[in-house]
Image (spheres, rainbow, N blue to C red):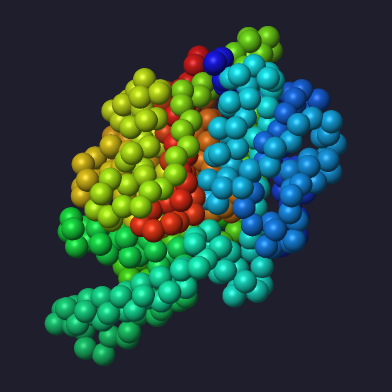
């Protein structure tokens, strides 16, 4: 197996791009990655394209990658399409890594892309349900909503003695099936370890503060902890700013063999130390979850440990997702993710900055582009190119990207570990 490097990264801003289609978003990201790598499209020998929902949103199936790449003049090369829920493009990176590591090609393109925003809100919400077991998800979500409403009422009753008289009931907004799943997991974690809603708000506030410095982020507005707690409730204990928005976007990466990196004289190559894909299992909620199991494999393959990580991008579709990920990745003990965040360790300037991009909560979550977007951020961090959100001295980085849901954990997950090799 040959060493594999990322030599270019580019992405579009994530957001509601009603004036752009999948072809224009993909072209913008691919051209940016080629420019970053100092290459032209003629250098690309193979491409792997990650996408989850275009079959539902636009009806485009089967040849999604070929369609967008041919439109920008990239053809006559192998194109592999990857669909793996929210970790589609992180999975695409692993496929491209294997191709180059095995010596089949020297230069590969990884593209993650998604168009999700549409005026049909009901159809939009169904996108997320399609990434779970559709035969049981409706009953599952109904039960979780009933549980969330009961717990919300209990919490309100407990707070009445401290609340001013005449205080209005907090506004409730409808979320997706996945927000209900995350909320249920958060409530169970609260019961087991005593984490608090305020700790989740601390995480969300930190990520929104990071996103102010990210020109690619869908949201670039900071919120105080109290503003986040006072925001409309999606599913107890999650308020709107704690949850990732719906949006569109694309991200692209250029992967190269070590020989090719030397051939072109790349000045700041980023080495892929490990990229590990795993699947969920049937288990009790309190047993080790997929992130905890998979991170141990990734660390072993990379030859590093949690203490070696300088910066991380984790899958915070909600603030609870980040809290759980910091525990699962071994950054802090189980049950202490909220305390770890309250102590400032995950903020830029802290012991281990997490989601300097703003995370999915702020940067956005166009599902097929999310994994490649995380890697792009980490490549810029390791190359010292992240501007106002730069983590000083970052040399080793980790990305954790979950996808879909079956039972009590993600259906798939990819953990990638990178190192600045210059």
On the image, the x and y values in percent for residue 334 come to 22, 45
Residue 120 seen: yes
Horizontal side of 369 relative to 346 (left or right) equals: right
Whether residue 67 is situated above or below residue 149 in the rendered picture: above
State the residue in front, 348 or 19.
19
Whether residue 132 is situated above or below residue 51 in the rendered picture: below
Q: Quadrant of residue 331?
A: top left
Q: Quadrant of residue 284?
A: bottom left
State the residue in front, 92 or 152.
92
On the image, the x and y values in percent for residue 99 come to 63, 25
The residue at 21%/88% (across/down) is 165
The residue at 63%/10% (across/down) is 259
On the image, the x and y values in percent for residue 118 come to 66, 68
Horizontal side of 98 relative to 33 (left or right) equals: left
The furthest residue to the left: 161
The residue at 49%/16% (across/down) is 421
On the image, the x and y values in percent for residue 360 come to 48, 52
Horizontal side of 221 relative to 93 (left or right) equals: left
Residue 399 seen: no
The residue at 26%/90% (across/down) is 166
Whether residue 393 is situated above or below residue 422 in the rendered picture: below
Q: Quadrant of residue 46?
A: top right
State the residue in front, 387 or 366.
366
Tell me the quarter of the image containing the N terminus. top right
Horizontal side of 290 relative to 95 (left or right) equals: left
State the residue in front, 90 or 311.
90
């Amino acid at each position: 197996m040959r060493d594999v490097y990322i030599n270019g990264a580019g992405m579009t801003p994530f957001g509601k791009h009603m004036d752009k289609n999948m072809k224009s978003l993909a072209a913008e990201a691919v051209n940016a990655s080629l420019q970053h790598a100092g290459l032209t499209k003629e250098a690309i020998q193979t491409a792997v394209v990650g996408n989850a929902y275009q079959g539902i949103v636009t009806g485009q199936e089967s040849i999604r990658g070929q369609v967008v790449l041919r439109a920008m003049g990239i053809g006559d090369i192998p194109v592999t399409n990857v669909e793996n829920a929210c970790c589609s493009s992180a999975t695409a990176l692993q496929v491209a890594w294997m191709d180059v590591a095995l010596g089949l090609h020297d230069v590969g393109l990884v593209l993650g892309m998604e168009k999700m925003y549409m005026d049909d809100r009901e159809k939009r919400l169904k996108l997320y349900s399609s990434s779970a077991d559709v035969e049981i998800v409706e009953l599952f979500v109904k039960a979780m909503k009933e549980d969330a409403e009961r717990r919300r009422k209990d919490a309100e009753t407990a707070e009445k003695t401290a609340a001013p008289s005449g205080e209005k009931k907090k506004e409730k907004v409808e979320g997706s099936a996945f927000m209900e799943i995350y909320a249920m997991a958060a409530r169970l974690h609260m019961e087991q370890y005593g984490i608090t809603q305020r700790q989740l708000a601390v995480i969300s506030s930190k990520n929104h503060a990071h996103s102010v410095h990210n020109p690619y982020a869908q949201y670039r507005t900071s919120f105080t902890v109290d503003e986040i707690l006072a925001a409309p409730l999606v599913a107890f204990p999650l308020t709107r700013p704690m949850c990732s928005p719906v949006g569109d976007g694309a991200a692209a990466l250029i992967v190269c063999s070590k020989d090719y990196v030397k051939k072109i004289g790349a000045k700041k190559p980023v080495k892929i130390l490990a990229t590990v894909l795993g699947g969920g299992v049937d288990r009790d909620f309190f047993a080790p979850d997929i992130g905890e199991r998979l991170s141990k494999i990734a660390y072993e393959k990379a030859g590093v440990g949690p203490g070696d990580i300088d910066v991380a991008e984790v899958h915070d579709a909600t603030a609870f997702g980040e809290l759980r990920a910091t525990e699962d990745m071994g950054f802090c003990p189980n049950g202490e993710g909220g305390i770890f965040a309250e102590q400032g360790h995950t903020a830029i300037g802290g012991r281990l900055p997490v989601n300097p991009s703003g995370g999915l909560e702020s940067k956005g979550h166009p599902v097929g582009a999310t994994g490649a977007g995380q890697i792009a951020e980490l490549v810029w961090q390791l190359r010292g190119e992240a501007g106002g959100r730069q983590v000083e001295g970052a040399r080793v980085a980790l990305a954790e990207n979950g996808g879909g849901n079956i039972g009590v954990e993600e259906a798939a997950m990819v953990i990638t570990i990178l190192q600045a090799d210059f």
